Image (spheres, rainbow, N blue to C red):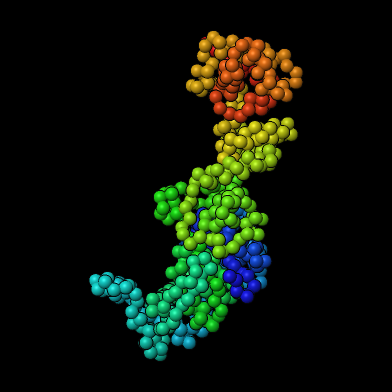
Amino acid sequence: MTSDRPVRVRFAPSPTGRLHIGGARTALFNWAFARRHGGRFLLRVEDTDTERNTDESLHSILNSLRWLGLDWDEGPEVGGEFGPYFQSQRKSLYQQAIDRLLAEGKLYRCFATPEELQELRERQMAAKEDLRYDRRFRDLDPGEAERRAAAGEPFVLRFAVPDGEEIVIPDLIRGEVRFRSEEVEDWVAVRANGMPTYNFVCVVDDAAMEISHVLRGEEHLINTPKQVLLFRALGMEEPLFGHVPLILGADGKKLSKRTGDTALEDYRSKGYPPEALFNFLCLLGFSIDDKTDVFGPEELVSAFDLKRVNKAGAVFDLDKLHWLCGDYIRRTEAAELASRCLPWLQQAGLVEGEPAAELQSWLVDLAAAMRERLQSYQELPEKAAFLFQDGVEPDSKAAKALAGEEARRLVEGMRQKLETLEPFPPENFAAVAKAFAEEHEVGMGKVMKPTRAALTGSLGGPDLGQVLKLLGREQALKRLRQAAART
Ligand code: GLU
């Protein structure tokens, strides 16, 4: 369901930390919804918590969004007609709304001290009643309230929740959710220090920015009735809401740092392909159809439908993410993969600085050889280290494969064979090895195992023809010679 207003959605992060998986998924769904409906995707920075905000967090959030491939039509760095897009720069707008609602009696001053409120809570707890503010200052004479405020007595502003209102939220994901206004307490809209609270500024901004649909995490559902009542108090049209399900760890509990990396940046720095993360985040509660797991932005945008977002919590399945990563890497062009892996090769000290043309093309061959075996760019240095060094030390399995007279004789025979071959490596190494095995009247395994062990130092790894190409004639023959000479 869409309203008849132009589609304008927002992602509203607080820059108090890095972008988490849940936030990234919320941003992605908003982006997809805007793109699907030809609407606008806004980024609004909820930076009212001056003690916890940092520039570093802001940049990290923006970078993570860009890394995922999300662009925004209005917001930081791009501007827009509904700015400023930082809440810290919108204080005068909030003040106007506060003054108006206070004058209209829709906000009122509450002078209850923290101790008095604590006492109230304890009393309600002892009586097993719902914990809620008892409206003790709601009917205070406004003149009296003003006098006490002028005398310097601290107060908060509370929202006067109207009695007897039905709040029906036609949630676009969960279906109709109903609240009665009696269930909503007179919540604090402005703190004693004059700072309006999240629920207040969020609504003032959503109204001013003409947000048509609010799509956000399920944890905000408890805020929605408060916000709906505030839209009504302001006389503004309320947006449509959709609450996306929680993300659960493998243990079925809400995803937390304990269950794995929760910041998107951690996946980036570990060399996960952004396309895989994009795809994976979509699958956290959404599916295009009943069979398609692998899809990208275009397919998402043309199929995005809130009706296909689940109500139930979405389980964060790390194996699935790794599988997707491997799948994307396998389908990446070798040249592209080489350039994506380069920072990790540099970090590991295997490549110094910008590679010259010859090394560059060797790295492309390397990427082509290793493509099938990677689930992240970060894995390449470790998995390919044997190709960068002079000589190789066999691991225990390889050493076993090289032990014995026959293995050494076959490795030496293979060396002699390869030495005579032109071009190097031969076009079809498997055929060469087969002919060699027949000539020596042994099975292929007897030849390949020690040859692989000699060339790579292990029993796994890429196709030996590719290994020979990457090592080059001199290094390959040297390794075979060394292995044959081992005692
Ligand atoms: N700043 C809020 C958050 O990060 C935004 C919630 C909303 O979308 O309304 O949770």
Q: Position of residue 456 (x, y in %)?
A: 58, 24
Q: Position of residue 217 (x, y in %)?
A: 49, 63
Q: Is residue 363 above or below residue 475?
A: below
Residue drawn at 58 percent across, 55 percent down: 289
Q: Is residue 253 above or below residue 141?
A: above
Q: Is residue 424 left or right of residue 387?
A: right
Percent of width and height locating residue 465? 66, 25
Q: Quadrant of residue 178?
A: bottom left
Q: Residue at x 56, y 64 (%)?
A: 306
Q: Quadrant of the N terminus?
A: bottom right
Residue at 24% from the left image edge and 71% from the top image edge: 126
Q: Nearer the viewer, residue 169 or 10?
A: 169
Q: Quadrant of residue 371?
A: top right
Instruction: Give the residue at x 48% y 87%.
Output: 104
Q: Quadrant of residue 32?
A: bottom right
Please tell me whether residue 358 is drawn above or below residue 442 in the rendered image: below
Q: Residue 309: x percent and y percent?
A: 53, 61
* Residue 437 visible (yes or no): yes
- Looking at this view, name the residue that lies furthest to the left: 126
